[in-house]
Amino acid sequence: MRPRKDEETLVDVLDVVLRDGAVLRADVIVSVAGIPLVGLKLTAAIAGMETMTEYGFFEEWDVERRQTAVTRRQHKKK
């Protein structure tokens, strides 16, 4: 009989979230005495940077970071 893994660990869950990503959405309405006062629509995305850029998040940030890295390499060669 071979041992098998029956329980998911936090590391396994984190690996899946970073690889595939997750989006959390929440609609919140703050009301007093049944009268809505404030409404919030919240969206949060979590994933590894490769996944984020693949889906169009942080594209400008990624381009800037890559350009900065190239500039630094070129500057070091001089």
Image: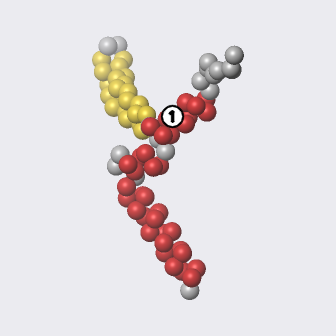
Mark 1: few, some, or many residues within 10 Å (few <14, many ≥20)? some
Q: Which residue bears the numbered disc 1?
A: 16
Which residue is located at x 57 percent, y 82 percent?
Answer: 77
User: Which residue is farthest left?
Assistant: 35
User: Which residue is farthest front?
Assistant: 1
Measuring from the top left, give residue 2's x and y in whole percent: 68, 20
Measuring from the top left, give residue 42's x and y in whole percent: 37, 33
Residue 66 or residue 5, whichever sits in front: 5
Measuring from the top left, give residue 8's x and y in whole percent: 59, 24
Q: In the picture provided, is 5 more to the left or to the right than 30?
A: right
Q: In the picture provided, is 47 more to the left or to the right than 37?
A: right
Q: Amino acid at mark 1?
A: Val
In this orientation, does residue 38 appear? Answer: no
Which residue is located at x 40 percent, y 62 percent?
Answer: 63
Disc 1, SS: helix
Quadrant in which the C terminus appears = bottom right
